[in-house]
Image (tube, grey):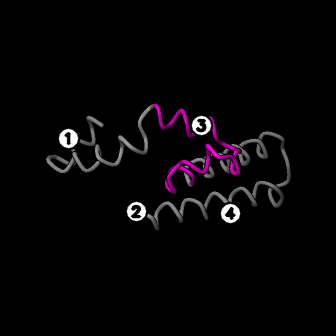
Amino acid sequence: MARSAEAMGEDAHILKVFFEPHLSPEKIQEINGLVGAGTTAAFARLNGFQQALAKYQEALLNLTRAHKSGGPRGGAGSIADKRGRNIAAGIRDRS
């Protein structure tokens, strides 16, 4: 945040306004706890950005597991790659 404030100057408050409700340490903890829980009531209470972030994190974890298992590149890895790209595109579109 401090480096962002240096770069953004007086507009840094915009980052703070976004950060507090979406990426505060408490929200990150909540999101991390709900990775892989896409159908629970707790997941449904997250806003769209937070749900996309949890899905993106899950896709990255799946991709990491596929690479560590030495699985073929064309299998689960490419599916996780595509899902991660689709989720990232959705996050960008909402911004």
Foreground mark, 3 or 4, reads 3
Q: Of the residues shown, which amino acid type is indicated by label 4?
A: Lys
Residue that numbered label 2 is attached to: 95
Q: Earlier in the sequence, mark 1 or mark 3?
A: 1
Residue that numbered label 4 is attached to: 82
Q: Quadrant of residue 85?
A: bottom right
Residue that numbered label 1 is attached to: 6
Read off the magenta span: 26-51
Q: Earlier in the sequence, mark 3 or mark 4?
A: 3
Q: Of the residues shown, which amino acid type is indicated by label 3?
A: Asn
Q: Which mark is residue 41?
A: none
Foreground mark, 1 or 2, reads 2
Above or below, 48 against 9 in this view is below
Cα distance in 3D space between marks 3 and 4? 21 Å
Quarter of the image with the N terminus is top left
The answer to whether residue 22 is left or right of residue 61 is: left
Mark 3 element type: helix
Q: Of the residues shown, which amino acid type is indicated by label 1?
A: Glu
Residue that numbered label 3 is attached to: 32
Cα distance in 3D space between marks 2 and 3? 21 Å
Q: Residue at x 65, y 46 (%)?
A: 41
Q: Residue at x 76, y 41 (%)?
A: 65
